[in-house]
Image (tube, coloured by chain):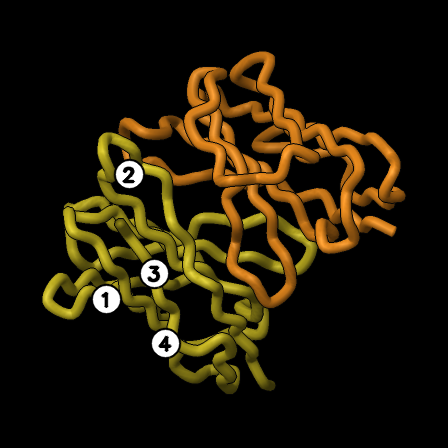
Chain colours: A yellow, B orange
């Protein structure tokens, strides 16, 4: 079985400050990990994904995430927040479960950016 | 049209109505998904189709009936819904389901459903 925990349903930062969104996963086999972003009235859009290549993954809009197996974490960061980053962010894990790779999503973290 | 499209974008229906949601993907993918997104609840996977065959059905009530006539189209038929079924229904597609977990999903904009 696989699961994802996103710590903090809301994260508030000032414009220009560091963004850190936390994601911890549980999987008994090597996982694939994803971060998605959802803007208001839109579907989810892929930010980045980890597929067992480099542990530091760079995505769109200046975001990156680091896979840490020892900590079972895949936290999302961005050095400097923009107002346009305000959105809902979802972490997802996909791992082999009896030959099936259906992804499991976290509950989401709402990023609030203050001017 | 590009990506994943969903129609209608908004739907209001009474509990005795029958309606259908439509999803179309223009990406050449072979797997399609229906999700339910309710306020303050996690994203709920409802159905998964791979190569037009249903491979996942997460204990969804029978008042929701999916249909996948080909790899580009996915429908969700609705009948005798309850007010708690009001939510955003998202469709997604991916290159593979069940065989290659590293393929990301592409989501449509969703249909906002309100059951009165």
Of residues B18 and A75, the one drawn nearer to the viewer in this rendering:
B18
Q: Nearer the viewer, mark 1 or mark 4?
A: 1
Which of pointers 3 and 4 lies earlier in the amino acid sequence? 3
Q: Which residue does the numbered mark 4 point to in the structure image?
A: A20
Q: Which residue does the numbered mark 2 point to in the structure image?
A: B102
Q: Position of residue A17 (x, y in %)?
A: 43, 84
Chain for disc number 1? A
How many residues crowd around disc 4 within 10 Å: few (fewer than 14), some, or many (20 or more)? some
Report the Cα–Cα distance between label 3 and label 4.
16 Å
Q: Which mark is residue A73?
A: 1
Q: Quadrant of residue B99?
A: top left
How many residues crowd around disc 3 within 10 Å: few (fewer than 14), some, or many (20 or more)? many
Q: Which mark is residue A4?
A: 3
Chain for disc number 4? A
Q: Could one spot residue B1 in this view of the protein?
A: no
Report the Cα–Cα distance between label 4 and label 2.
24 Å
């Amino acid at each position: 079985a696989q699961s994802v925990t996103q710590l903090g349903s809301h994260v508030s930062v000032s414009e220009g400050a560091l963004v850190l969104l936390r994601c911890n996963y549980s999987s008994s086999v090597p996982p694939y990990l994803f971060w998605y972003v959802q803007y208001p009235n839109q579907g989810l859009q892929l930010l980045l994904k980890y597929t067992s290549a480099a542990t530091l993954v760079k995505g769109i809009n200046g975001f990156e995430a680091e896979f840490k197996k020892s900590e079972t974490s895949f936290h999302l960061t961005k050095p400097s927040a923009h107002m346009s980053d305000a959105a809902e962010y979802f972490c997802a894990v996909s791992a082999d479960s009896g030959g099936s790779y259906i992804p499991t999503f976290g509950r989401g973290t709402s990023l609030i950016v203050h001017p | 049209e590009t990506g994943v499209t969903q129609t209608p974008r908004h739907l209001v229906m009474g509990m005795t109505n029958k309606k259908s949601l439509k999803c179309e993907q223009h990406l050449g993918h072979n797997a399609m998904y229906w999700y339910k997104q309710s306020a303050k609840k996690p994203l709920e996977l409802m159905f998964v189709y791979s190569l037009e065959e249903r491979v996942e059905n997460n204990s969804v009530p029978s008042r929701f009936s999916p249909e996948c006539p080909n790899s580009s189209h996915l429908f969700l038929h609705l009948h005798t819904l309850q007010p708690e079924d009001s939510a955003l229904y998202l469709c997604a597609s991916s290159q593979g389901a069940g065989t290659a977990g590293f393929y990301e999903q592409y989501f449509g904009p969703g249909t906002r459903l309100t059951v009165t």
